[in-house]
Image: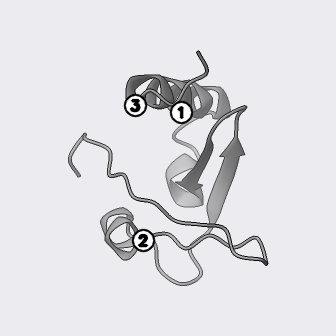
Amino acid sequence: MPNEPMIDVTKVSDKGQVVIPKEIRDRMGFTEGSRLIVVATEDAVVLQKVETVAGKVRMRDLLDRVKALTDRLGFGRS
């Protein structure tokens, strides 16, 4: 998978559901029933495959990666 982030726009439904765009689902290998960890910071929400996190990345490392990415993309708080 390329290192460059894939960015798209989606919206939250009245039931609180969010559709992950097909191109991103395909790239990430998300299929029906995929289990995801949801990480929320002050200004970002990140979805991570449970299988990817289990035994590989500690939660603090994941949060550090989220912060670095949001800073890089300019989404961090000023």
Report the Cα–Cα distance between label 3 and label 2.
Answer: 19 Å
For the point 57% across and 34% down, the residue is: 62
Q: Which sits in the foreground, 55 or 73?
A: 73
How was this image coloured? one colour
Residue 73 sits in quarter: top left
The three-letter amino acid code for the residue at tag 2 is: Pro
Three-letter amino acid code at disc 3? Leu
Q: Position of residue 60 (x, y in %)?
A: 65, 26
Q: Would you call the spot at circle 1 few (<14 residues within 10 Å), some (14-19), or many (20 or more)?
A: some
Vertical position of residue 62 compared to residue 50: above or below: above
Residue 11's spot in the image, x, y percent?
59, 66
Kind of residue indicated by mark 1 = Val
Badge number at residue 21: 2
User: Which residue matches tag 3?
Assistant: 73
Label 2 environment density (alpha carbons within 10 Å; few <14, some 14–19, many ≥20): few
Nearest the viewer among 67 and 7 is 7
CB-based contact (under 8 Å), mark 2 and mark 1: no
**Secondary structure beneath disc 3?**
helix
For the residues labelled 3 and 2, say whether their Cβ atoms are less than 8 Å apart: no
Query: Would residue 41 be found to the left or right of residue 70 on screen?
Result: right
Residue that protrudes farthest toward the bottom in the picture: 32
Q: Is residue 37 above or below residue 25?
A: above
> Disc 1 designates what residue?
66
Task: Give the foreground label among 3 and 1.
Answer: 3
Left or right of 56 on screen, residue 16: right
Q: What is the quadrant of residue 47 in the picture?
A: bottom right
Is disc 1 placed on a helix, strand or loop? helix
Q: Along the horizontal axis of the image, is 55 left or right of 31?
A: right
- Could you give the CA–CA distance between mark 2 and mark 1, rounded to whole angstroms? 20 Å
**Marks 3/1: CA–CA distance:** 11 Å
